[in-house]
Every structure is written in structure tokens, then in C-alpha cells.
Amino acid sequence: MSPNRSPRPRPPKPPRRRTEAEEILGPEDASLLDIVDNLLNKGVVLNGDLTIGLARVELIYARLSLLLSAADRVLPGEQADFMERHHARHMMRRARRRTRP
Amino acid sequence: MILCVYALVSSSRPVQRLTGIAGEPLRAISFDRVIAVIGYVRRRPAASARHLRQYAAVVESIAARVPAILPVRFGTTFDDLEELTLVLRSRGSALRQRVRAVRGRTQMTIRLVGSDPVNGPSRGQTPVTSRTRVRPRNRATQGTQYMQERLTMLRTAREVPELVSIRPAIRRFVKDERVERRSGVATVHHLIPRAMAERYRAAVTGAAAESGVRLIVSGPFAPYAFADNW
Amino acid sequence: MPRAKRRIVASTAGLTVSELAKLNDLRRELERTSASSPLRWNADPDDVQRSVAQLVLTLVEFIRKLMERQAIRRMEAGTLTDQQTEDIGRALMKLEQTVVDIAARFGVLPDDLNLDLGPIGKLM
């Protein structure tokens, strides 16, 4: 008894439902948290502002261009990322295990 | 006109014909092997929802065209090129390292609600008062003991217990991780190969469903959370 | 205006209403902290000494914490010798104690050593 050969049917694409977040927060707000978090709380910081005052009167406004770098990011020869190093160690262990008789 | 900086990238050519949040043409300027994507605008952009979305869109449009991008914080402006030059020249080495680290990769974000930090305050903050000084220390090794304690606190702050059941499913994608706890929400950012975004998402939602963990996964985004290496 | 690629947010089916509200709280909290003018120091004219001490010691503690974080990363990565680890740990301990002691003399509590340092504040 030969099986009925027919091309495998594709499952129908479901209509895109609004997620619960969109229902409650609104369709735009569903991703506004990520946008706010990424843009206002993260990203490279290149400068900052400082106001200096006396007796609740702000007198001086200064722009600070931040020059902080971790020393081992600047000095040559230091390995970079912990995760990369961790991964490298993991790969070395795996390689050693493979070559073991 | 002031300078608005959108991102630091690895290659300048694809930036042509892109526009910034004020519709201004974007330019790529090279500072000793760090390339900044900038636009000249009239005033510093205010952080309205509309501007934020526009800025995010600009960053993603750049990200789509370059292999490596470090988004710059929203609203970063300079009065002139000289100041930007000074900043990028002095930090060039560290920034180049970060650009290399995110090459070919993208950010995915997992958020878990109701996560209490396992130990102490959030974001790895360690108020001066919370040191345990009661335990007697061997005088010869008290410095090392101190360092070990701090390392343990740091590792604990990085832990997200709810993710334990999920990690095996995504371990092979994750190149780097950042954890932040704030306002009762634990946020985990993962740096993964760009091509793996949908596989990562499927793995996370699958593992979450299996272990009954409620979370929200979003992305892919340009690697905002991986702009620094602290 | 470049057309942005649509970002997909995974279905939040399963999250309770209060959990979604918490996410909204987080968003508002982030907006709030970024909107406030980051770095601001305003000396109290009635207690200038205390204000100055608080500013100076906060900056010292900030730098100490930066060094500590970096040192711990190096220890974790194995790029410090045992002796370096011991020496740095001891120095960090002593520095912290010094900051707390001097602060106490000016009536500054340890919890006051925490100016909001804006964009770099997250390092604390």
C-alpha cells in the first residue's frame, strides 16, 4: 500500500494578534521601554554636564568630556573580555578532551 | 549648528545617503581609526518619545549597513569638532576594542519581573556601610580575603536565578552578558551573532515555557548595553 | 527619514497585569532619572565645610570603587599576581576605612557619600 504522496502542507500563518503588552500599554509603548532603556541609560557616554552652585543658586555650568578608560583596555597585551577568555578556556578544555586517548 | 553624535562604527562608506533625526545628512568622520557618525543639528534634541524613536531608527539604519556599531547615548552633542576630536583621540584605544568586541553581533534583551536581588542592593551597588567586618581575618591574607569577598558580591549581583533553567538553551549563542536590576525588574542583555536572533528568541521562549518562567524577550537591537566594559 | 526595520517584541502572554505595570514603572523611572540634571553640587551656606567634605569624599569613594571594580576584574581574569591581589586588597580596605573616618569627622554619614553622578553614576 503506497502512501499518498502529496507535498507537505504549510501551516497557515496566524493573523498577528496584539500582544498583552500592546493591549495595556498601547501599541507604541510595547517597545518604548527598550528604547528608553537603550537610549537614555546605555550607549557610549562621551560627555556630561555639571552645574555648580552656592546657596541654591546655580552659578557655573561645565561640560565634562569623560576620559575614563579601564587601564587594561588601553595597555597592550591584556586580553579583552572575560566572556571571551572564559570561552577560550572552555574551547581549550574541549580540545584537550578530544585529543585524550 | 552643533554636532550630534549617533554612533561609532568600523566602516564609513555605507553611511552615505542616511539622514539623522532632523533630516540632516549623516557624515562619517574618522578619528585615528575610530569612526564617528554625526549630523549637524540646530539644537540638542529633547528626550520626547518621538525623538527617541527617531534616534533609535537612525541607529538601526546605520547598524544595518555596518558590521560593527557602538550606539552613542541619546542627546550627545558637541559644540565643535575639536572637542569631539579630543575625546575620541584620548579614548580611541578603549573604544576601538569595544567596537571590535561587538562586530557581527547584536543585542537581545530578557526582562524578568519581580526579581529581588539575591544579595543586597541593585546594580551591584555596595554602600560603604554594608561591609562585613565582624569575621576575624588572618592578618597576612586580609587583602586577599577582602578581594575574594568583593568578587563574591559582584558574582552574586550578576546572578539571575530565574535564568538557570534557560541558560543551557542559549549558551551557544551568548558571547557576552550584562545584568541590571532596577525597580523590581531584572534585565539581562545578551550579545549574540546577528544571524542567530530568531533562533535565540525561539530558544528562550521555548525554555521559558517549559520551565514556567515568565519573561519578555526583545530585540534584536544595536549593542547599546555593550558600549562599555566595566 | 530612514525607514526603521520593525522590531519585534516577543509575545508577553503569561505576564500578569501587575508585571506589565512594573515594566511601565521601570520605563518611567528611567525617564525620570535621565531627565533630572545629572551632576549638581550646591554648597549649603550654613554648613559649607560639610558640603565640601561630602563632595570631596564622594569623589574619592567613587574613584576608589572604580579602582576596586577594575582590580576585581583583573583578579577574575587572572592578570594579577597573588602578591598584587593581597596588596591591592589591603590598600582598598584601608582607603575605604579612611574615607569613612574622615567623613565621620565632618558629620557625613557613609550613605551620604553618594552623589548622583549622572551618566557615569551607574558605575557605583
Image (spheres, coloured by chain):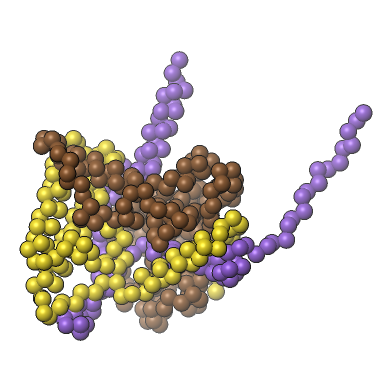
Chain colours: A purple, B brown, C yellow
Taking depth in this image into account, of B129 and A14 the one nearest to the observer is B129
Could you say which is closer to the camera, residue B145 or residue B224?
B145
Q: Quadrant of residue C65?
A: bottom left
Question: Residue at coordinates 40% horizontally, 53% vertically from top-left?
Answer: B116
Q: Residue at x 23, y 64 (%)?
A: C114
The image quadrant where one finds the N terminus of chain B is: bottom left
Looking at the image, the residue that sits furthest to the left is C105
- Horizontal side of C13 relative to B24 (left or right) equals right
Of residues C59 and B68, which is closer to you in this image?
C59
User: For the point 10% across and 62% down, which residue is it?
Assistant: C104
Position of A51 relative to B147 (above/below): below
Asked which quadrant contains residue C117, the reply is bottom left
Residue B99 is at least partly visible in this image: no
Q: Where C68 falls versus B87 (above or below)?
A: above
Q: Position of residue C30 (x, y in %)?
A: 40, 67
Drawn side of residue B185 relative to residue A8, left or right: left
Q: How many labels does the image show?
A: 0
Asked whether residue B75 is in view, the answer is: yes
Q: Is residue B180 above or below residue C114?
A: above
| Image location (x, y in percent) of residue A32 | 51, 68
**Residue A91 x/y as whole percent:** 43, 32
Position of C67 relative to B71 (above/below): above
Quick one: B72 or C37, which is closer to the camera? C37
Image check: C102 left or right of C113?
left
Image x and y of residue C102, in percent: 8, 60
Query: Residue placed farthest to the right in the image?
Result: A1
